[in-house]
Structures are given as C-alpha cells and as structure tokens.
C-alpha cells in the first residue's frame, strides 16, 4: 500500500499560502509591538506575552515542515529565534533585578531588547516583501 502525496513545488519555491502565513506571522508580531508602544507595556513583554505573538510562534512551529527547503525556511527560523531570544533577555533582566544593584542594567537590557525586536520584525518583513531569504547562521 503506497501513500500518495501532493507533487512538490519547484525546489526552493514555497506555496503562496505559506508566503501569506509568513506575512501573517510578521503582522501578528508587529501588532504585539504596536500595542506595547501605544499601551502601557514594554515592547519585549508585549512581544513575548501577548496573544498575537504567541499565536505567531504557534503558526511558525505548526507550518515549519511546509517551508523546509524553501527560502521561507529562513524567515521561520528568524521569527522563532526572535521570540526565544526575547524570552532569554527577559530571563536575564529578571536575574539582574534579583540582585537589586542590577536594576538599571535590567532596564537597559529590556529597552535594548525591545529595539532589537523592532529591528528584527522590520528587517524580516522587508526581506519577505522582496521575496528573498534571510541569512541563516
């Protein structure tokens, strides 16, 4: 008994549906950042703890296999790494706050991480609009 799979697209070419999903993920992350800027939250906390951003990461993991081997794979990796590095920077700043003397440094880390998140969203979305891959480490 053989299982029939849909014919693969041309090597390295993602489906238009996956391009749309990638735009949606950037839009969800951007909405999380925008809501932090106009609200009372910091960018990094809104990025990590807001429902749009969590939904975006779930979409990334859910569709990761569908973009493997295409230029969109770099965007998915970029988005996932942005989220988890933001979580790491929150953990680092919490540890700094525990020492009390590190409170000013923790605030600086959170502000810089917020700017870094903004940069990653803008750069990633800009490269996606140009339909190019991001550099993968």
Image (tube, rainbow, N blue to C red):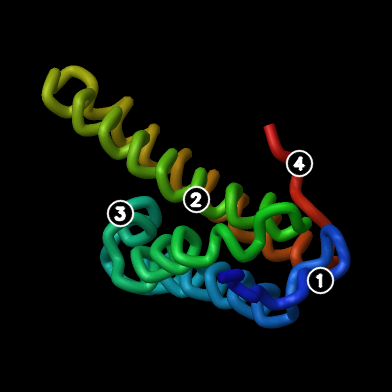
Q: Nearer the viewer, mark 1 or mark 2?
A: 1
In this rendering, position of residue 28 left or right of residue 94: right
* Percent of width and height locating residue 69: 73, 53
The residues bearing labels 3 and 4 have C-alpha atoms spaced at a distance of: 26 Å
Q: Is residue 4 above or below residue 115?
A: below
Q: Which badge, 1 or 2, comes first in the chain's sequence?
A: 1
* Percent of width and height locating residue 124: 68, 57
Residue 45, numbered circle:
3
Do the residues bearing badges 3 and 4 touch, measured as CB atoms within 8 Å? no
Residue 135, numbered circle:
4
Q: Which badge, 3 or 4, comes first in the chain's sequence?
A: 3
Q: Is residue 84 visible?
A: yes
Q: Is residue 37 visible?
A: no
Q: Nearer the viewer, mark 3 or mark 4?
A: 4
The residues bearing labels 2 and 4 have C-alpha atoms spaced at a distance of: 14 Å
| Circle 1 SS class | loop
Q: Quadrant of the C terminus?
A: top right
How packed is label 2: few (under 14 Cα within 10 Å), some, or many (20 or more)?
Answer: some
Residue 80, numbered circle:
2
The residues bearing labels 1 and 4 have C-alpha atoms spaced at a distance of: 22 Å
In this rendering, position of residue 58 left or right of residue 28: left
Q: Nearer the viewer, mark 1 or mark 3?
A: 1
Q: Which badge, 1 or 4, comes first in the chain's sequence?
A: 1
Which residue shows up at 45% across the image and 41% down it? 113
Question: Which residue matches tag 1?
Answer: 9
| Circle 4 SS class | loop
Do the residues bearing badges 1 and 4 touch, measured as CB atoms within 8 Å? no
Which residue shows up at 71% across the image and 39% down it? 136
| Circle 2 SS class | helix
How packed is label 1: few (under 14 Cα within 10 Å), some, or many (20 or more)?
Answer: few
The residues bearing labels 1 and 2 have C-alpha atoms spaced at a distance of: 24 Å
Residue 65 sits in quarter: bottom right
């Amino acid at each position: 008994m053989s299982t029939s799979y849909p014919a693969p697209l041309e090597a390295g070419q993602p489906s238009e549906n996956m391009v749309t999903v990638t735009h949606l993920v950037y839009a969800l992350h951007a909405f999380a950042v925008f809501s932090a800027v106009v609200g009372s939250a910091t960018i990094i906390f809104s990025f990590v703890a807001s429902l749009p951003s969590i939904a975006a990461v779930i979409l990334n993991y859910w569709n990761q296999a569908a973009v493997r081997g295409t230029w969109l794979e770099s965007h998915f990796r970029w988005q996932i790494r942005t989220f988890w590095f933001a979580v790491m920077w929150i953990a680092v700043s919490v540890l700094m706050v525990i020492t009390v003397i590190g409170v000013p440094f923790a605030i600086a880390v959170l502000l810089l991480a917020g700017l870094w998140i903004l940069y990653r969203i803008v750069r990633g979305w800009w490269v996606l609009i140009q339909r190019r891959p991001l550099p993968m480490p």
